[in-house]
Amino acid sequence: MIDLRLDTLKEIPERTSCFSYDRSVVTPGIVHLSVGNFHRAHQAWYMDQVLEAAGLQDWGIVGVGLIDDATERLKLEAFPAQDDLYTLTRYAADGSVRHQIIGSIIEYIFAPGDPEAVLRRMASPEIRIVTMTITEGGYNQDPESGTYHLGARATQAELAAPATPSSAFGYIVEALRRRREAGTQPFTVLSCDNLRNNGAITRRAVIAHATALDSSLGEWVEKNVMFPNSMVDRITPAVLKEDADRVNAECGVHDRLPIISEDYVQWVIEDNFCNARPPFEQFGVRMTDDVHPYELAKVRMLNASHSMLAYPGQLAGLESVKDAVDNPLIHHLVLDFMTQDVMPLLTAPEGMDLEQYRDKILARFGNPHVGDRLARITGDGRSKLPTFLLPTLAALRERGAPTDRIAFVLACFLGYLAGKTDGGDSFEPFEPHLSATERAVAADPIKALTSLPMFSELALNENDPLAIRVAQYVHALREMGVMKTLATLIE
Ligand code: CS2
């Protein structure tokens, strides 16, 4: 197997395609904050095509790792050793597969090791866009008010020492401050996370952070910096060692951190930039005045359906998204959820038919080759449920429409927090934004629903029929298990 580096590209087997642009002339145009698998399968894949086009070699990506953890340390070793190149393997549902080498990330900076290097890059005029995938839970929103949480300990530390930030917002604000001081045009900030109004939320956060430092900086940001909303989509599973070994053998390339994804992709961006941008529309990106209907459909149908199948699936002892969607009862639940609960609340985005979109989502979940595991989907339910699922629940309640399907899945979420499948196997729920005390509260469903900040939007009291319903499902789950309980919901 060939080690992946610029000087070995000529030896790569033909079955793995490779970009044809001259990597040595590519210069940075984008700084991306938090280079996770999704970024490498999605935005970096698009940018790889941009770099192929004549005259667009000034759109290379500088990837920044923000968090000091084991995964980031792996990247710190792997990325420079392979000149930031990596393989992307895309599986279509019909079994066809494409392997390719992506060259659009041209530099990686581990921010905790060298914050100044990141700020220098971000302040430099050649950077015209800062993109980010910091996850739904990364936006530092106050659980009570939903606004930017200036009082958070890490934010306070950044405000006290702005030249050594730790968060995306700290970096963006300090870089914008430097640009303003130097008379450099600001960059556009483009959030690529699955949040409704991701641009508007980012804007609010950056303005709040900037204003707390210097009100005139806040005003300047408000006037001069653009934060387009965007919708992103491509299912990108976690890559375990066995997956990496398999795709490396398939590619004939030894990549320390290869990427796997489905072949489906979508990117819709609000055309609202304050500095240059690549001609995205030439590369399959939909540029629009209004992203909202697209993000609403995506988050409330795809992401919410993922949650809808993952909590019951994991409790039932299933492993993958495919296993869950192939289960007739779960399939039924998710189909009914999209058709009866979500779709009546949505307006179809231009050029999209919601029924076809729904069927496509179910087919994508059933892709037998992607190997997406339920544990990836269930993780950080604390951030995902309020974004993906609870707004639909609130809207159904307002209409007086039935809410049993979502109530059942909330019960499954509380069951998942206990970390045991129906078969008695233990697992460790990944909930970085729930404290141990909050997790303990989850054992009492009524208390959980009425007191945990993640449910505060629902404003439930202990006599609310929804809270009582969830409690009944929790009881049923304990008494008869997830599948029998689910069967009671399916007409
Ligand atoms: C998933 C998303 O994490 C989740 O819960 O629903 O990561 C999903 O795979 C992507 O948004 C697909 O675009």
Image (cartoon, helix red, strand yellow):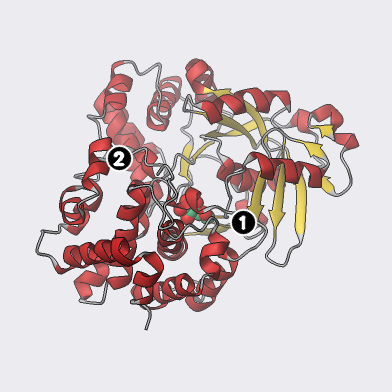
Looking at the image, residue 477 sits to the left or right of residue 129; the answer is left
Residue 366 figure quarter: bottom right
Q: Position of residue 488 (x, y in %)?
A: 33, 77
Which labelled disc corresponds to residue 45?
Answer: none
Q: Which residue is mark 1?
A: 281
Q: Nearer the viewer, residue 458 or 272?
A: 458
Q: Quadrant of the C terminus?
A: bottom left
**Residue type, mark 2 in image:** Leu
Few, some or many residues within 10 Å of mark 1 (<14, 14–19, 20+): few
Q: Between disc 2 and disc 1, whose residue precedes?
A: 1
Label 2 sits on a secondary structure element that is loop
What quarter of the picture does the N terminus occupy? Answer: top right
Which tag is nearer the camera, tag 2 or tag 1? 2
Q: Which mark is residue 434?
A: 2
Q: Is residue 81 left or right of residue 341?
A: right
The crowding category of the residue bearing disc 2, from other C-alpha atoms within 10 Å (few below 14, some 14 to 19, many at least 20), is some
